[in-house]
Image (cartoon, coloured by chain):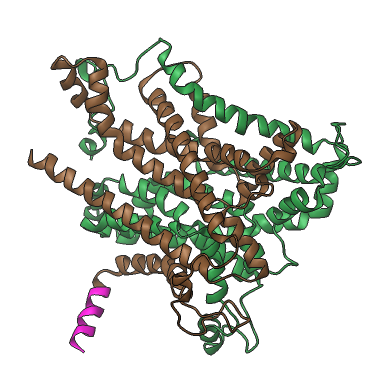
Amino acid sequence: MTHVLAAPPAQSAPGAGGAPPAAPRRRRGGLTGYLLIAPAALWLGLFFVVPFYSLLATSLYDPEGSVLTGYDVTYHWQNFVTALAQYGEPLVRSLWYAALATAVCLVLGYVLAYAIAFRAGRWKNLLLVLVVAPFFTSFLLRTLSWKVILADDGFVVQALQFVHLLGPDGRLLATPVAVVAGLVYNFLPFMVLPLYASLEKIDHRLVEAAGDLFASPARAFWHVTWPLSLPGVVGGTLLTFIPAAGDYVNAALLGSPNEQMVGNVIQKLFTTTGDYATAGALSVILMAVIVTMVIVYVRKAGTEDLL
Amino acid sequence: MNALHRGWAWVKEHLVLTLGLLVLAYMYVPNVVVALMSFNDASESRNLYRFQSFTWDNWLNPCAPAGMCESVLRSIEIGLLATVVATTLGTLAAFALVRHRFRGRGGMNLVLFLPMASPEIVMGSSLLALFVASGFGGKLGFWTILIAHVMFCLSFVVVTVKSRLGGLDASLEQAAADLYATEFQTFWRVTLPLVMPGILGAALLSFSLSFDDFIITNLNAGQTVTFPMYVWGAAQRGVPMQVNVVGTVMFVVAVAVVLVGEAGARRRRRLLEAA
């Protein structure tokens, strides 16, 4: 057991054991580092960090203004109350749908990632490419195609009616089921890839050792494979949950107009209604909720070193 | 009968792999539907989400719907420009992060990670808030879309190139130095070719992210229409079947590019092993 854990990856321990350090892989000092990073840093600073500040300012606009007459920052905290009072329901719905979709993705994604990492042999690379390939057909088109698949007179609905999982006039389109199904489908690769990355790193001898010590396969999985794959689970769930909570395409195309997600509301307030103050406040709330949930979740999962 | 029997035996022996392949197959159902619908004759029908009868028409007149091909070209143009800028800036940044020590490295890593973890609607609306606040509200269009696309592609480029660069065997570069290569020669003849697959992968990823983005684009596009926005608009009015042709072509081209790249990588690996 010890030799397995102690075996260091070839190049990660420079200077260990008195050997000469393996080349100066990082150079200290000098301007080159700064010069190389500067363009990207500047771009992200200007167009990612500063905009967040702009969004905060927008959320504190005086709602009396309008797109035409202009707004003033009046520290109108009331915007947050208004946003929550008017749009609390879509906000909660978004978080709930995203959580459901993430759970289903975790189950499906784990099976697929596990199969590729441990059972695919020399087809590993090809299968991995196949996970990403569907992505190259436009995201909107693929979502629209679920309208064809889940149509009221379609094959899926008929099959479900046949086995009585769905009533004779039951339907899937324009229901929460369709929205969550769409979310699951669209964000599955975001789950599979991090899971694969962390499953692939697991030393198979550890699982074999568990077997040698008379652990059943299920026990070996639960006490060895699963804990070692946790970084992938945390990464995958975050990469699925966060975009799913903000998505509005699935809800708009597959759901019912009465059951909007928070993304639909924000988009509409910004582009159609022009109510920048409320839209800004709602965006800030969404981001704050997500950040809080992520911090709590990462703490609970005990993988703080991830962030 | 015998084949069925053997098939079943295989499934029982490879249960996990079978389940995995089923999940993978599920991911392809929409692609198959898009391909099928590209042959759908919808001229007589009002229900555009149902296959009526087979026709080649959509493939013969792909540009028939007004404005669609223009939107595709615009998306390609934006995608190419965004890819060039994001890949260049991202590759430089990846080199800085892996090969150099400087103050603020940790912070930079965080800032590069955040765009991948932020909901698109928040990124899109904050960028819109900035553009409006700085007086560009009336000038939304090509350039604001481009700025946004470079922004969200950057992180993905940095992550991809960084992982390739981090996994590089340092001894190859040392060998070059031992053979009296200058620092520039080492970089140009050894390091860069070794990192190239990562850079190309990052570029492909950037292009497809940019080509496909809807949420951020929609908020920052003004009157400019990209292909995803065209599809979105069409979804409210009734989708012309030709959009499925575009989707199918995109898929086939991308898969071909990836498979050619994969084949190239295999060949290189074999050559390296033989050497």
Using residue A10 as the reference point, say whether residue A173 is left or right of it.
right
The residue positioned 32% from the left and 66% from the top of the image is: B16
Is residue B7 covered in magenta? yes
Identified at 40% across, 10% down, the residue is A29
The magenta span reads B1-11
| Magenta span main SS | helix
Residue B196 or residue A84, whichever sits in front: B196
* Residue B149 appears left or right of A272: left
Q: Position of residue A270 (x, y in %)?
A: 75, 48
Q: Is residue A43 magenta?
A: no
Locate residue B265, reporting x and y percent. Answer: 23, 46
Task: Point out the residue furthest to the left here.
Answer: B274
Taking the spot 27% from the left edge, 52% from the top edge, the residue there is B260
Instruction: Say which of A114 and A129 sits in front.
Output: A129
In the rendered image, what is the letter of the chain coloured brown? B
Q: Position of residue B177 (x, y in %)?
A: 18, 17
Residue A193 shows up from this direction: yes
* Residue B180 spot, x, y in % from top left: 15, 14
Of residues A182 and B7, the one nearer the viewer is A182
Q: In the rendered view, tell whether residue A77 sits above or below residue B53.
A: above
Can you see residue A15?
Answer: no
Number of numbered discs on residues: 0
Q: Quadrant of the N terminus of chain A?
A: top left
Instruction: List the single residue furthest toward the top.
Output: A30
Residue, far right:
A64
B13, above or below A276, in the image: below
Give the chain ID for the green colour. Answer: A
